[in-house]
Amino acid sequence: MRFCLLSVFLASWMPSVSGISIEINPPNPLINDTVLLNVVGITGTFRYSDWYRGQGTNATNQIIRINDRGNVIAGPKNFPEASLVSNGSLQITKAQKSHEGYYTVSVQANQLLQAEVNLRILDPSEPTRPPYTPRLLSGGAIAGIVIGVLVFVALIVAAPYLYKKYGSPVSDN
């Protein structure tokens, strides 16, 4: 049992230690800002970095690639405002609403690592909307659900007894 718990702990902890992530700089970019999608957490010898538009690493969505020699190769989804910096991070100059969406990076260093981020570009001319917050159930609603489930379970448990005691028809033969 201890080995199982240790395995679960290590499996959930290790990706956060050896993984990479993407930091958006500035954190809340505005239209026409220069945005850096900064790859952090790369350990070991950098070999190459691939950037993709969208979630996943489908070759048709590749924006750009850089290798350890600094060679840059444009992909099918490349756009003029996209460029790479030496550590494999993606820079977008004069960011527009059309640049919003998911970006995925695949980095080869000591191992192949991948991360994704959802980029949002704020338009100062649009009114700001508060972020969506899901509605939580009230205490009364939770209590009603719990009581309903308990009554339902009690009926299922009691049903065979009640049927045997009261539900069997008595034959008049």
Image (tube, rainbow, N blue to C red):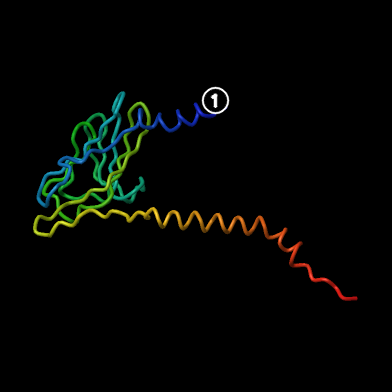
Residue 98 lies in what quarter of the image?
A: bottom left
Q: What residue sits right under mark 1 in the picture?
A: 3
| Residue 74 x %, y % | 24, 45
Q: Amino acid at mark 1?
A: Phe
Which residue is situated farthest in the bottom direction here?
173
| Residue 112 x %, y % | 37, 33
Residue 162 versus residue 21: which sits nearer the camera? 162
Residue at the spot x=9%, y=50% of the render?
32
Residue 129 versus residue 79: which sits nearer the camera? 129
Q: Is residue 28 left or right of residue 108?
A: left
Please identify the quadrant where the N terminus is shown.
top right
| Residue 84 x %, y % | 19, 38
Please identify the quadrant where the C terminus is shown.
bottom right
| Residue 41 x %, y % | 28, 30
Q: Is residue 80 above or below residue 4?
A: below
Residue 19 lies in what quarter of the image?
A: top left
Q: Is residue 148 left or right of residue 95?
A: right
Residue at the spot x=61%, y=56% of the render?
154
Residue 43 versus residue 149: which sits nearer the camera? 149
Mark 1 crowd level (few <14, some 14–19, many ≥20, 10 Å Cα): few
Mark 1, secondary structure of its residue = helix
Q: Is residue 119 left or right of residue 57?
A: left
* Total numbered circles: 1
Q: Is residue 5 above or below residue 133?
A: above
